[in-house]
Amino acid sequence: MRSMIQIISLGLLISPVACTHKVNIVSPEGNHKRITHEARSKKVMVASQGGGTTRAALSVLENGGNIIDAFVAASFAISVERPHSTGIGGGGFLLYFSQKENKVYAFDFREVAPLMATKTMFLTKSGAPQPLLSQEGGLAVATPGLVRGLFEIHQRFGKLPWKETLGPAIKLAREGFPLYPELHEALEDRKNLLLLDEEAKKTFYTPAGEAPYLGTMIYQENLAKTLEVIAQEGADGFYEGKIARSVVETVRKKNGLLSLKDLKTYKMVERTPVEGSYKGLKIFSMPPPSSGGIHVIQILKMLSPYELKKWGPQTTQSVHLTANAMQRAFLDRALYLGDPDFHPVPQKELLSETYLSKLSKAINHPKALGALDVKAEELPYESSDTTHFTIADEEGNLVSSTQTINGWFGSGVIAQGTGVILNNEMDDFAQKKGAQNLFGAVGGEHNLVYPRKRPLSSMSPTIMTKEGEPFMALGSPSGTRIISCVAQTILNTVEFEMPLYEAVAATRIHHQWRPDVLKIESPYLSPEVEKELKEKGHNISHEQLGCSIQAIKKVKGHWHGVSDPRGEGLSLGEL
Ligand code: DON
């Protein structure tokens, strides 16, 4: 591998979309932006939501590290660079394709409910849900899983010393990075909550309590010190001792339930990826406790018998069927999905050819499937956080990982003196059957709170292979919308044969059954298409979906990488 890192700029060379239909795509702000969002024809590729993170992963590979070392370095770096989205106070999933073994591994380092959690912990005495309790403050915090997961995965597959993989993140925390628009927006959005916390105020706001100007350096010295302890002591440095005590004391002060035992006994779980075949490709994605993998595959399989390619992308027929397929998948989500260690998920049945062929026929209705006449509440607020990154190395190994603290700045609880921002992943449980979470997802029986249970996720880190060779890897943040965004990017690439950049940048839609709304982001679909969709009974709403796809794809033996132009990502490769 050559040490010189090159960015291929294609700002002016917008490649034509392979299919003949005109497609609306999101414009990057000025041609120069596309430079950071796309890289082509490299042997090694990293696509992540942060420049410091992409460079951290590449530098580890350059220094002789393997793909798992790069994964660990990227995970710690993104924890620093996107403190509103993810961090060591949260959790996530990893899909890892080992070329040598021709095998895809799935690792689950999702947060778990504290031992003292109960089914009714978020309900009033009369049984009414209290959404704010699972979104802000101590009760919202589930036991973090990220550090244990990274440590164990590194023990098993890493090559460089553990300590070295934390180097770039420590530097980023100590030497800082300039405040960028999305972090600024998150600081404004969560100001009232974060200003209640002295450490958050000192780290992220001006003395007058304002979000700093864009470009102001953000330093996280306490987090740098915490990362140094983890570098020295491994995962135990986080789950036991001073840091663990600070996490527990702070959460308890804010009325939470976390205990030292919760931290000490947290376990990562290795799972079997869900698998589906689609148009000659194999799709591997995250199994429960994520709903993501099952539903991405369901949506694609429901659509596969139809002539979407002939109709074209963003046409009435294609969008109508896609929206119906999404609704059907989300209905299954509410009915059957939850932590498989607590309730069996009928995974085989949900993905069986017979079942999917029945669903496929059912979605071909001239009218929108509708929400079975149940009108849902509107969401309290929608944030766009979590993070995804994707890495390919020279040997053909792939990493696809989605990590999160859930809402912007998670619970808003920062373990005093440590810089650790704690998640609000308890909100991904159903407070009661039928209640909605932050993303409006309807919670079923199988997703009620229980001690040690993992809340249901939508995160969908995905890897695709073709005849045993790596073909594509992708994922995104944005709650339930992740499923729709990942499925559409695959559809655009495989069914509509769009080049990767256009496949990622094309206008997306989202329908999650309840609320019965077909969300269309800008640039919207053509007025005629939207009119025809309305006539079919779709309740259209124009809103941004918050996804930020980070995708890589093999093209003529080399990797192309694309970071969604909707965000501040960086795709970079090496020859
Ligand atoms: O696991 C999940 O599905 C959510 N906690 C992910 C949250 C997320 O993507 C936040 N971004 N909007």
Image: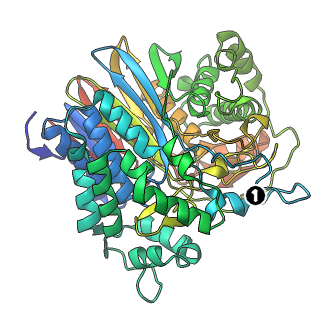
Helix, strand or loop at label 1? It is: loop
Q: Locate residue 541: give its quadrant.
A: bottom right
Q: Please state, as top left, top right, bottom left or bottom right, where the N terminus lies in the image.
A: top left
* Front-lying residue, 398 or 413: 413
Residue at the (34%, 67%) spot, across then down: 222
Q: Amino acid at mark 1?
A: Glu
Q: Locate residue 95: give its quadrant.
A: top left
The answer to whether residue 132 is above or below residue 266 is below
* Front-lying residue, 56 or 353: 56
Residue extending furthest toward the bottom: 208
* Front-lying residue, 177 or 313: 177
Residue at the (44%, 75%) spot, across then down: 199
What percent of the width, then of the height, locates residue 349? 69, 15
Return the residue at label 1. Answer: 378
Image-based side of 312 in relation to 172, left or right: right
Query: Looking at the image, can residue 498 be seen?
Result: no
Q: Please state, as top left, top right, bottom left or bottom right, where the C terminus lies in the image.
A: top left
Within 10 Å of disc 1 (Cα), the crowding (few <14, some 14-19, many 20+) is: few
Cβ of disc 1 within 8 Å of ligand 1?
no
Q: Locate residue 418: give its quadrant.
A: bottom left
What percent of the width, then of the height, locates residue 521? 57, 52
The answer to whether residue 96 is above or below residue 210 is above
Q: How many marks?
A: 1
Image-based side of 238 in relation to 427, left or right: left
What percent of the width, then of the height, locates residue 187? 48, 71
Query: Looking at the image, can residue 459 be seen?
Result: yes
Residue at the (50%, 55%) spot, across then down: 385
What percent of the width, then of the height, locates residue 41? 21, 33
